[in-house]
Image (cartoon, rainbow, N blue to C red):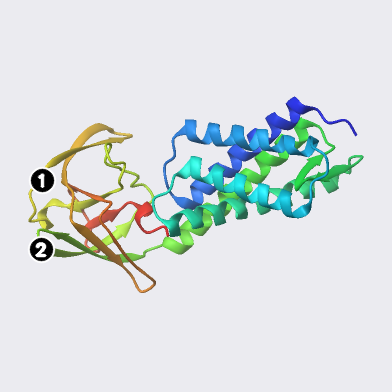
Amino acid sequence: MTLYVDILFIVNFFITYLLLLVTKLFMKTDVKAYRLIFSSALGGLYSLVILFDELSFFISAIGKLLISVLIVFISFGFVRLQRFLKAIGFFYLSNMVFLGIILGVWLLFKPNGIIIKNNCVYFDISAKVLLISALLAYLISFAAVKIYNRTIGKNEIYSLTIIKNNQEVHLFAFADTGNKLKEPFSNYPVIIVDSNKMQFEAERLIPFNTVGGDGVLNGFKPDNVIISSGKKMIKTDKVYIALSNVESKDFSAIINPELINF
């Protein structure tokens, strides 16, 4: 079977990019495009290990693990160990889904062969069929993640405690996937809180961008916030509070889901 290095790289670059997009959906976080592109290029380059002489299973498995950890690190960074491990887990889950769907398409088309070498797989099908399969896998994964997020997060209200200068404010908060606001200098996620519920003075302007236009919100950095539900409790100081109008009878704050996605 003939292996084409350029096709091998391009296809694996594209598939790695789609895998990272699915992982991003699971993580409910924003990632800079250049980070995904750089990570995908690394994935494409690593696929060339299939051209090397046969490696032991242990060495190839360790290499696969290290490169996947590096890809996740470049894409999502490292903020907390739990969050980083969760990103790795979702990345591997995405890999399994993709491989299963692509293998299914491969069995349908029944090409001449398949190469599994150094823990890498090369399908003897055209790049067009493989990329279409990858796109199909992405669409299926996208739909599954959306259903998962809606099912898990539906109508879940959190208890929110904001602590600053030894004073505490207790509120109810809703985790909204539409809130991806971050403080631009620290890149910390932002919780939007009803200004009528806050007694702390604003000390910073936090810019925002929506479909309706751009603007700024008054905000401040708390000493800590505690977010809790019946399932878990999270305490962090890596967060900002933005003051706005929150029109709801059930909650007074809107949480960036990145804060609770551990």
Q: Is mark 2 on a helix, strand or loop?
A: loop
Q: The N terminus appears in which quarter of the rendering?
A: top right
**Residue 12 occupies which quadrant of the picture?**
top right
Amino acid bearing label 2: Asn
Residue 60 shown left or right of residue 74 in the figure: right
Please name the residue that numbered disc 2 is placed on. Answer: 166
Please tell me which residue lies in front, 111 or 91: 91
**Which residue occupies 73% across, 55% down?**
58
Task: Estimate how packed mark 1 is, as few (under 14), some (14 to 19) or many (20 or more) residues with alpha carbons within 10 Å.
Answer: some
Residue 133 shown left or right of residue 171 in the figure: right
Marks 2 and 1, Cα distance to the nearest angstrom?
17 Å
Residue 5 seen in the current view: yes
**Which residue occupies 16% across, 45% down?**
219
Amino acid bearing label 1: Ala
Q: Is mark 1 on a helix, strand or loop?
A: loop
Q: Where is residue 115 in the image (x, y as percent from the top left)?
A: 84, 43
Please tell me which residue lies in front, 92 or 194: 92
Q: Position of residue 175 (x, y in %)?
A: 34, 57
Please tell me which residue lies in front, 186 or 55: 55
Can you name the residue that lies furthest to the top here?
6
**Which residue occupies 11% across, 43% down?**
203
Rendered position, 171 above or below 111: below
- State the mark number for residue 202: 1
Q: Where is residue 19 in the image (x, y as percent from the top left)?
A: 60, 44
Residue 188 shown left or right of residue 200 in the figure: right
Which of discs 2 and 1 lies nearer the camera? The answer is: 2
